[in-house]
Image (spheres, coloured by chain):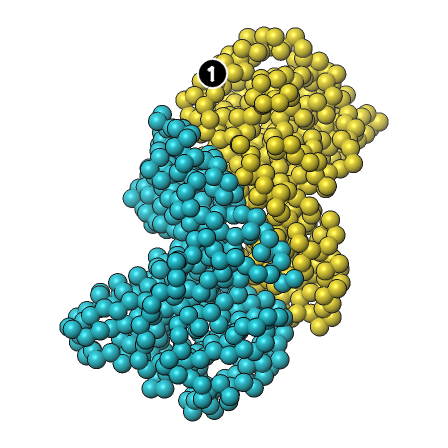
Chain colours: A yellow, B cyan
Amino acid sequence: MKLKRSPLAPAAFPELPQIEGMVSTTHSLGMYKYERDDLMVVAFPDGANCGGVFTRSLTRSCDVDWCRQALEETGGKASSLVVNAGNSNAFTFQNGIDKNNATLDAVAKAAGKPRTECYLAATGVIGVPVAPDLIAQHIPAIWPNLTPETPWLTLASAFMTTDTFPKGAGKTIEIDGKPVSFAGIAKGSGMIAPNMATMLAYVFTDAPLTAQQCQYLTSRHADATFNCVTVDGDTSTSDTLMMFATGKAELTEEQVDANFDKISDAMHEVFLDLAQQLVRDGEGATKFIEITVEGAISDKSAKTVACSIANSPLVKTALAANDANWGRIVMAIGKALEPMNRDGLTVNIGDVRVAEGGARAASYDEEKATAAVSKPEISISADLGVGSGRATVWTCDLTHGYVEINGAYRT
Amino acid sequence: MKLKRSPLAPAAFPELPQIEGMVSTTHSLGMYKYERDDLMVVAFPDGANCGGVFTRSLTRSCDVDWCRQALEETGGKASSLVVNAGNSNAFTFQNGIDKNNATLDAVAKAAGKPRTECYLAATGVIGVPVAPDLIAQHIPAIWPNLTPETPWLTLASAFMTTDTFPKGAGKTIEIDGKPVSFAGIAKGSGMIAPNMATMLAYVFTDAPLTAQQCQYLTSRHADATFNCVTVDGDTSTSDTLMMFATGKAELTEEQVDANFDKISDAMHEVFLDLAQQLVRDGEGATKFIEITVEGAISDKSAKTVACSIANSPLVKTALAANDANWGRIVMAIGKALEPMNRDGLTVNIGDVRVAEGGARAASYDEEKATAAVSKPEISISADLGVGSGRATVWTCDLTHGYVEINGAYRT
């Protein structure tokens, strides 16, 4: 099925800085009926420190199991990354493990590095066995092609599935006159839910960060970015977010420590940009929706309510149809069963107050509310009136396109 | 919008027994653009005992608040029931309370009974204020029309919203040669989620049951019936399930006690029939899906996993498209985060084993699996392999029809 580029997509793929100490290439394993690369290989000849967070799914893929094991055994050292699209290698048990072992052996041989420093991920259909040497057989031919010159657009495109546009975000900051660069790429379109956002995302930096700093930054920023986007409330078996630091930027440990907040802010910016692009490419999406819940008893409670609104099919279908059926937002708030004051609840769509004091706002104006939900970018805010807990999540609408794509995905 | 009768609808509305001691009628408040009755009024001239369970939503309607209060104040006595469609009277705060007070006063006057013996419900759009005398003004004219002869089909039709067929179920059993009858009617199509199934349902019997027995039977059987169906995981603000016992059947208290299981079984049968009809009329539904999860650590855990499958948009859209994409079932099991053994998991679609031992079944046959998901009635079963907990839930597929109906509902 040919998918049209999402109407919410950025105008173009961004300019991203090169990350010194990183080489890469893409390749076609022939997983797709049509011509495309479906494999991304990244290597760090001089090594890199890394951190990662992964799906909490109990049916997670063996690739996720491997990455967790490798992170633990190496204490966060990386020399390569291999990501394929077309088959998620999830729920393939021994077959998937065999495939990964073959891949790791081939990479270790080609790179001359310990296999535990190679990180793996796969995305695509769940539960379909693959040939053990699916990737391994190509590694010897692929390795010589690794180059610092591979365009980010090419890398980001190599592991897309139902994505309608490649996703990238980056930033270069200056620390004591020295440039420090960040570049991230991601894929994800469906099976996106706020429980370790359901996607593959990789952020690379030349900052000389320790493995501990990488893990800290990845975990810390995942919460307010990738873990705050949802398309359909379905959580993938392959969620992976990793960051790699080559340490090639000319910074001392002291300079990193002294400027850690600056580095952290840059990371957060890149994470959030990528996470929001996942929603902008939500399957069938025609609306980008930001939902903020305030006045909850805790930030956690606020997020639960925000996700209840974000994942409500009735809210999402109404917004898709430009229908200001705000009562469904009230419904979604109520079903979350989090502490709230029904008779003090206020709800805004954009800058239109639709509900207050437990009823329709006195100032309610159907035309204004309809105008607010008819925009391609919609913000919804609710105040539960019981505390100071606050959370913002991002989602998209539920359209015929979603039903179409997910009925036709395999066929 | 004219809705086509669900392809999963029963061939015809069933024959239901008359319940002695109950009179009823319907009326048009003019809530709809087209000609239809939108009000059901039921009265019990000699009184009835009753019980009920209601939505747990924290944005529940004032009608639900009232029914809870009335049940408590009267200890489960009923003399009338007034249900309207076209406006849910939810999230209308004082306006809704005023409307209910006016209705209750008018009914108390017409019936010559305490207002606390009148139970109310409303279904339709949320948050739209209504005239306080919307119903009250009609009561004096309506009351003389109450008759034992009103067809159940007429009653069941008077409070439908997006329903494509009226829902009824009944049974007559014999106890010591005496007939005891049960008749139930329900509405519900969207905003159906397993948290006190989201609908209005009323079951009437002539059995001389105490209020305590009514409450016990309602609560007990709601769990395995109405609380086990889901269309979209959205929980309504107006869920109401009530049963009324007129006590006109010629049974002694001893006969009731001696045959309580028989009565309980009949109630369960009627509840389950009505609950499954809600799913058969799920908005846009083309498939009736039964999901059984076994081998969980508890029945509660099994139900959580079953609902995770039942509410997964990816599972529902695949089934809608006759796509045996069973990996999505594995995904939905994993995201539930309930104890399970990934590498021992088995999944069946109908009698086709699709997954076992943490991977695709050795016997997997795509053609057979496709045939299994191409039927209008699909059964899915999964064994988590960690205990003996078991649950069955019922749902429907997610189709263009759902998106269509819920984009157009108000407009």
Q: As displayed, is residue B348 above or below residue B391? A: above
Residue B202, how many percent across, how many down?
A: 40, 70
Circle 1 sits in a helix, a strand or a loop, which is it?
loop
Q: Quadrant of the N terminus of chain B?
A: bottom right
Q: Residue at x 69, y 69 (%)?
A: A361
Residue A231 is drawn in which quadrant? top right
Residue A383 visible, this angle: no
Tell me the subunit letter for badge 1. A
Quarter location, residue A372: bottom right
Q: Residue at x 64, y 20 (%)?
A: A35
Q: Which residue is mark 1?
A: A132
Residue B352 drawn at (x, y percent): 35, 35
Query: Which one is nearer the viewer's eye here, B388 or A141?
Result: A141
Q: Position of residue A7 (x, y in %)?
A: 73, 41
Relative image position of residue B348 (x, y in whole percent): 36, 37
Q: Nearer the viewer, residue B13 or B322?
A: B13
Relative horizontal placement of residue B208, taking residue A181 as reference (left or right): left
Q: Residues within 10 Å of mark 1 (few under 14, many from 20)?
A: some
Direction left: furthest residue: B176
Quarter of the rendering occupied by the C terminus of chain B: bottom right
Give the residue type at disc 1.
Pro
Q: Find the residue positioned furthest to the right.
A: A177
User: Could you tell whether B165 is left or right of A122 in the image?
Assistant: left
Is A398 situated above or below B22? above
Inspect this view and state whether residue B96 appears.
yes
Q: At x 55% / y 45%, what residue is drawn? A: A233
In this rendering, the count of numbered labels is 1
